[in-house]
Image: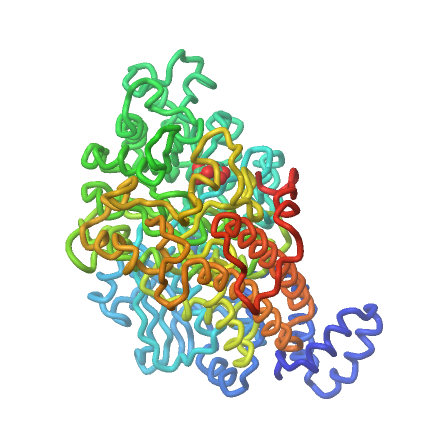
Amino acid sequence: MNICNGKLLKKNYLLYKQPKLLLLNRLLPYKKTGYFLLYFLFVISLAKAEDGYRLWLRYDLVNDNALLKQYRSSIQAININGNTSTVAALQKELNTGLQGLLGESISNISQPANNSIVAGTPATMKDIKAMVGADALNTCGSEGFIIKTVHFNNKNIIVIAGNTDVAVLYGGYHFLRLLQTHQHIQDLNITSVPKVKLRVLDHWDNLNRTVERGYAGISIFDWQTLPDYLDKHYTDYARANASIGINGSVLNNVNASALILTPAYLEKAAALANVFRPYGIKVYLSIKFSSPIETGGLKTADPLDKAVQEWWKKKADTIYQYIPDFGGFLVKANSEGQPGPQNYGRTHADGANMLADALTPHNGVVMWRAFVYSESDEDRFKQAYNEFKPLDGKFRSNVLVQVKNGPIDFQPREPFHPLFGAMPQTPLMLEFQLTQEYLGFATHLVFLSTLFKECLTADTYEKGAGSTVATIVDGSVENHALSGMAGVANIGNSINWTGHPFGQANWYAFGRLAWNHELNSAQIADEWIQQTFTNNPAFLDTVKTMMLLSHEILVDYMTPLGLHHIMGYGHHYGPAPWYDKGARADWNPVYFHRADAMGIGFNRTATGSNALAQYAPEVQAMYKDSNTCPDKYLLWFHHVSWNHKMHSGRTLWEELCYKYYTGADSVSWMQHAWNNMKGKIDEERFEHVKMLLAIQHKEAVWWRNACVLYFQTFSHQPIPEGYEQPEHLLAYYESLEFPFAPGH
Ligand code: GCV
């Protein structure tokens, strides 16, 4: 039965709309033919609202008959032993998933049988080592898993093995992914071990449920009704995270309220930790450095003060009474007005180490953010490096310094942060932003995997060629015991979690890359589309192409050729390259693009701010000459004349126009491509994306017109022939205001 066939979808969509009785009448004839059960399951699966809530864990009936037959014959029962909550979660997920995918319920058995799945650890299954090999399990650590088709004691078995229950849970999710993406399962031999230890979502969620830079509704964490009411979102959030290997969640905004560490909130956080624990997810909290003053009644928060140190130690002890496996603290200090050790003349290391000492007895970690910049004449690009590099080697072993992917602030495109490769003695945790603060909010379709990969594969040359950001972050270059990757979540209480249905793909891609940064974006897109929408090859090809091009398209219509931070002031919505009224120079777009009669761009070479000197000589060599610097980073590092010859042969001005116009046109192409997908998926999500693409197109044209008109006031050159003229004058674009832009 082909559920992706447009006709059937339509028919059942109508059925879904029928009153119940009519539905029953329609079903009656099927009873006679014996197909009732199958048809019933089919209808149930279609009757589920396609509102995106199920994310990539949809488990709809496999619509390839040959595969379905293969799956049904190889999976006739499940044998899982153990009585932990993680085992129960795995059992439930496999039962639900397989029932949906195979259209029949699978029995649970207590011994391995022919054509069964056997899932467990050496502690819960006596034969597991013999089935997969003890040596193989030794390579898995505490989270890696093996999925293997074996012939054991004359039985054909699919083994899902790991050294811990959580590892087996990860294996279970991977197995379901194999089925959802229609892989053959006769000859499986998969070993998968995460490359990074801490794979964490950072929520910028406030205790009043507003979300800083959140565009998908309010926070899913309802602090008001916690700890007594446990919303269904919490379990489904944990399931989704576990399915992609995310093992940590920072519940609250880095611009933290001190209240989070008070008993009332710790009790609430503990309730969430209890829900997440079976899924291998640890809870972390963002803390406010001045908490000892704000809620502890102390006069200072000086990290070298004995009473302050004692206060944090006691606080840590209390937290662990509530949450025995608490992960640790995330800290934004001396950044954008947040208090920190520098308020007392101390360093970031002094602050981080004080907290680390309080957490050490409990095995907690400190994730200390390097996103710092202050009002100064120094190029903002350089400030984090200047502050943190001298501290390399001064942090306790349970501190990670958390560094954003680029030196400024989650721009549509940034070169990698120069701290990667510059702090060999410190584990550096990479921070990506999934929420699209600078990338069109939740209305622009942008698949961020390609942005993530651009950063991960960049070579820092810390130890010669091949010391990529990814290998610095996973700890392999310096053999660090700790490693981590964080993603600023794009989740809210929108029915589909992320606002834009394709925002889910960024959550998915982050998790998959944190687990294995060697995956490529095409693979990730492929998996996500198949699980989230359909396995239909025409849909898959078209939508994958759209996704893979989407980031470059956005860069073209927003910030081509290395432009950055030219968004609306404060809320970062829409273009405002003209803005120069911000309280601080480095909050103004004009600070970043530096357009003048001569040209445009920020000179960061030796004749300018010399930020380039923060990179290894090999990286400097790639970027230091404006004639050889890759176009995509040109204006990040050079102030170049409007008539500068680009690699294409066009002048800089012509190239800038070309990029802006191509970017906006490419969104029309995405619209066209999407429209051709009508009927290949459900109407609900098709229409949703269609409407959002229309907004994206409108906004891409707005970006193009506003930017080209504004930069033209410096270049004094015409918009090249053949391009349509902007609809309005520059003054119109400059006059637009958005006092209620979300997330601000
Ligand atoms: C949470 C940018 C954002 C802020 C954010 C900050 C940070 O400046 O605009 O909203 O604050 O980054 O990462 O701390």
Look at the picture and state if 446 lies above or below 285: below
Q: How many tags in the picture?
A: 0
Colour scheme in use: rainbow
Is residue 270 something that shows in the picture? no
The quarter of the rendered structure image containing the C terminus is: top right
Is residue 532 something that shows in the picture? yes
Q: Quadrant of residue 359?
A: top left
Look at the picture and state if 11 lies above or below 341: below
* Nearer to the camera, 673 or 39: 673
Q: Position of residue 460 (x, y in %)?
A: 23, 53
* Nearer to the camera, 595 or 698: 595
Q: Position of residue 242 (x, y in %)?
A: 44, 56
Q: Position of residue 562 (x, y in %)?
A: 40, 53
Q: Position of residue 179 (x, y in %)?
A: 47, 74
Look at the picture and state if 341 lies above or below 363: above
The quarter of the rendered structure image containing the N terminus is: bottom right
Q: Quadrant of residue 168?
A: bottom left
The residue at the point 69 percent across, 74 percent down is: 43
The residue at the point 54 percent across, 84 percent down is: 64
* Nearer to the camera, 724 or 100: 724
* Nearer to the camera, 255 or 38: 255
The residue at the point 55 percent across, 69 percent down is: 59
Residue that extends furthest to the left in the rendered view of this protein: 464
Look at the picture and state if 84 lies above or below 292: below
